[in-house]
Image (tube, coloured by chain):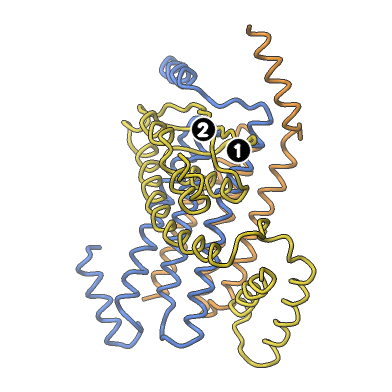
Chain colours: A yellow, B orange, C blue
């Protein structure tokens, strides 16, 4: 099941990047995608026990997650703009390092969580050590927003809903 | 109209790169410098698309932009791996424990 | 230049047949200009912020959004017609945007981690106050 998904993803990539639809180029694409799938298909999707329906649900939830994170990026940029340009922003700058522990298990969920923390206003992931995240923050009030775990809940809704139901 | 817009955007990008070049020139640490190079590299991908619009060959220059941003990413990772002293996490924890012990 | 005169210029360009599809162009121009403004914030932040970690805030965030907006704007501006080729071009530009969206936070995290492991300590609030006082004394 999973090799077919990987082959389709690679083929989609090929079609977008080549942009030609005649038989010669598509044939080349099929051959090279088959070879790549055959050689390195075990690199993507570590957990093979999940079914196709579960993967589709994850993809759908991830697409719903994108607008929220984009809006967070806009807010983060407004915040940086304010800190950089106004004098009041310079006054309220208070850098510090915060530590917290996550309940997410898989590596990919941690990757998405770290990137989301980097993109939300005022925080950057500095170091991940197992389950412990070290985060550099810039303003006091944004730190409170982080420690209530709103971002973590959003990521858990996408990738690990069973963890959320236990809580 | 499109060409006019592309020229204005390109000039604006170029002007705004000057403060970052100042940061690369001045930067107290090596990390500041590689950070500036990284930002300019990302913006160069945009500049390539702008140049493509001016020449009327965007479909070619978009590939260049993709490749350039890929190389930029790889360069940032490689230099950050090169610049740190490559201590392992275990060693770091041991060092922190030593520090905590000294305080206590 | 005010918005009104800008729209008049655009309308004239449409009558001459220079511009293909007006609303897309306007959205593209607007998002490009907004991206340039956010990049201004990044550039000023890179110069004015006190230490490496705070500069990283400016670079990691501003870079992502401004690049996305500018590339997206140019993707819309270059849509002259709705043929397969121009759709493919738009999708390609979206692929570049997605790539940058994923890689910029990752590379900034890698740099941050490298700097932290290199024993470069982040500035605390007290350090910031001290440096401000020093600056005032010098003046």
Left or right of residue A62, residue A43 in this image: right
The answer to which of A123 and B24 lies nearer the viewer is: A123
The answer to which of B79 and B19 lies nearer the viewer is: B79
Q: Position of residue A64 (x, y in %)?
A: 42, 60
The answer to which of C123 and B13 lies nearer the viewer is: C123
Q: Name the subunit of mark 2.
A: A
Mark 1 and mark 2: span between their CA atoms?
9 Å
Residue at 72%, 60% (x, y): give it: A43
Residue at 52%, 27% (x, y): give it: A97
Query: Mark 1 vs mark 2: same chain?
Result: no
Question: Does residue A94 lie above or below B18 as drawn?
Answer: above
Which quadrant is home to the N terminus of chain C? bottom left
Q: Residue under circle 2?
A: A136
Contact between labelled residues 2 and 1, with CB atoms less than 8 Å apart: yes
Question: Does residue A20 lie above or below A162 as drawn?
Answer: below
Q: Name the subunit of mark 1.
A: C
Question: Does residue B68 lie above or below A106 as drawn?
Answer: below
The answer to which of C22 and A112 lies nearer the viewer is: A112
Q: Which numbered disc covers residue C71?
A: none
Residue most toward the front? A166
Circle 1 sits in a helix, a strand or a loop, which is it?
A: helix
Label 1, residues with CA under 10 Å away: few <14, some 14-19, many ≥20: many
Residue most toward the bottom? A23
Q: Which numbered disc covers residue C112?
A: 1
Residue most toward the left? C4
């Amino acid at each position: 099941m999973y090799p077919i998904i990987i082959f389709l993803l690679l083929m989609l990539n090929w079609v977008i990047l080549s942009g030609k639809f005649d038989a010669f180029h598509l044939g080349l694409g099929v051959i090279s995608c088959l070879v790549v799938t055959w050689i390195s298909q075990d690199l993507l999707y570590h957990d093979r026990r999940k079914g196709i329906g579960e993967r589709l649900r994850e993809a759908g939830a991830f697409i719903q997650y994108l607008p929220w994170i984009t809006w967070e990026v806009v807010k983060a940029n407004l915040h940086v703009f304010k800190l950089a340009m106004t004098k009041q922003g310079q006054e309220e700058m208070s850098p510090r390092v915060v530590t917290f522990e996550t309940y997410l298990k898989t590596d990919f969920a941690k990757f998405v969580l770290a990137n989301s923390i980097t993109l939300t206003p005022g925080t950057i992931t500095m170091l991940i050590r197992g389950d412990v995240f070290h985060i550099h923050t810039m303003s006091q009030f944004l730190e409170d927003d982080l420690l209530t775990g709103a971002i973590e809940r959003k990521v858990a809704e996408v990738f690990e809903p069973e963890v959320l139901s236990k809580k | 109209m499109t060409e006019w817009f592309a020229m204005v955007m390109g000039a604006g990008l170029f002007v705004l790169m000057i403060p970052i070049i100042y940061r690369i020139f001045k930067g107290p640490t090596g990390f500041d410098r590689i950070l500036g190079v990284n930002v300019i590299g990302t913006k160069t991908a945009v500049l390539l698309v702008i140049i493509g619009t001016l020449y009327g060959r965007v479909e070619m220059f978009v590939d260049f932009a993709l490749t350039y941003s890929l190389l930029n990413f790889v360069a940032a990772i490689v230099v950050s791996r090169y610049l740190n002293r490559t201590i392992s996490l275990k060693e770091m924890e041991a060092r922190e424990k030593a520090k905590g012990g000294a305080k206590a | 230049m005010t918005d009104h005169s800008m729209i008049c210029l655009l309308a004239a360009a449409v009558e001459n047949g220079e511009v293909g599809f007006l609303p897309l162009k306007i959205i593209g121009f607007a998002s490009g200009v907004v991206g340039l403004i956010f990049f201004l914030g990044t550039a000023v932040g890179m110069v004015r912020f006190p230490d490496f970690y705070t500069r990283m805030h400016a670079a990691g965030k501003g870079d992502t959004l401004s690049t996305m907006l500018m590339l997206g704007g140019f993707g819309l501006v270059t849509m002259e017609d709705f043929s397969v080729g121009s759709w493919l071009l738009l999708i390609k530009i979206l692929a570049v945007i997605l790539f940058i969206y994923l890689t910029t936070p990752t590379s900034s995290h890698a740099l941050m981690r490298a700097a932290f492991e290199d024993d470069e300590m982040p500035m605390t609030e007290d350090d910031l106050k001290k440096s401000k006082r020093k600056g005032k004394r010098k003046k």
